Image: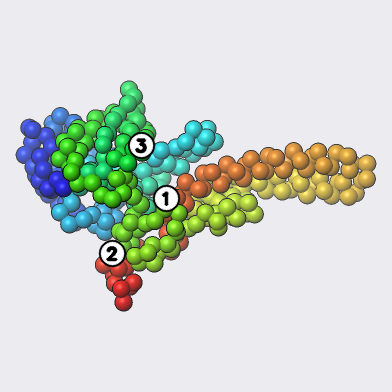
Amino acid sequence: MPAPDFRIHDNQLARTDTLDGVSIRSDVLYTNDKGEQKESAQKRTGKILQKLCPVLQRILLPGESILYAMPARSPLSVVEQLTAAWWTALLAACVIIVTNKRILFLPVKRDGNWRESVRAVQWGDLEEVKARGLLVRNVTFKFKNGAKSTYTNFRRADAKKLTAIASALIPAASGEQTSAHGPVQLCPDCCGVLTERQYSCAGCGLSFKNEKTMVLRSIFLPGGGYFYTGHPLIAILPALVETIFIVEILLILFAGLASPKAVPNLFAGLLGLGIFWALETAITILHCRRYVREYIPEKRDPTRSPQSAIAKISA
């Protein structure tokens, strides 16, 4: 595993400093892809880390130093992009933290605060990091297990910086693969690896929001899926649309009961509204499923340390 003082740029000596209790490499964090000192890079990364330092104090490993931090958007399917419209930025906003040991993917809220979800990949499990695009770049991460993930909406400077760091660290960590050979989801309390589609942590017992409850709320409550996954702003429009559908269905039923002549049109009207409602609900479930699969805790104490979380289970 690359040491905290592993040299990234030939024109910069390794400088390890501390920022709000977190170890950083200022020779990398505050420079561009060529290792040239940039005040703009210091301001951008400093603003990001100001929001996330309390989180990073919890999840960084011993001997782990932050090399860079940048905003991006998590991978979205074509269907998700077409149906998310203006709230795509809210749907997939994340911050990527690059360290000497791994890359951390942290979903964030609109204000840049953490969504209590952690995805990580060790440098030894990465095969390639490749950037594409002109003004705004996409970055594809290719893993040793053959899978790929493309994160989007990078600033050009950030994408170039990330690929420069990767070109130095991937060869250095090539012989240090984990059993996953790719990214893993981590518990935000004990930092243990979570099992896919199992919505509780085997290490500390933390419970996460699950797909079954999300689907039921999406079907039976207007905007229920979005409210359940903690996105009330996004939930407003679907909730209004679904409420209108329910009112329209009730009006059609009452009209059919009040006038027997309206019965022939009753089933056609109900069928049309039912199809629209089913499509809208399916879109809600599609979007909320990606939130749930990011492992959103049901309830957790943000002040509980990883050590105390593990001690709770061991007792």
Observer able to see residue 294: yes
Q: Secondary structure at mark 2?
A: helix
Q: Secondary structure at mark 3?
A: strand
Q: How many residues crowd around disc 3 within 10 Å: few (fewer than 14), some, or many (20 or more)?
A: some
Which mark is drawn over residue 306? 2
N-terminal label among 1 and 2:
1
Q: How many residues crowd around disc 1 within 10 Å: few (fewer than 14), some, or many (20 or more)?
A: many
On the rendered structure, is 175 left or right of 200?
A: left
CA–CA distance between discs 3 and 2? 30 Å
Quadrant of the rendering where the C terminus is positioned: bottom left
Residue position marked by numbered label 3 in the rendering = 148
Q: How many residues crowd around disc 2 within 10 Å: few (fewer than 14), some, or many (20 or more)?
A: some
Residue position marked by numbered label 1 in the rendering = 294
**Label 3 sits on what residue type?**
Lys
**Label 1 sits on what residue type?**
Glu
On the rendered structure, is 309 left or right of 265?
A: left
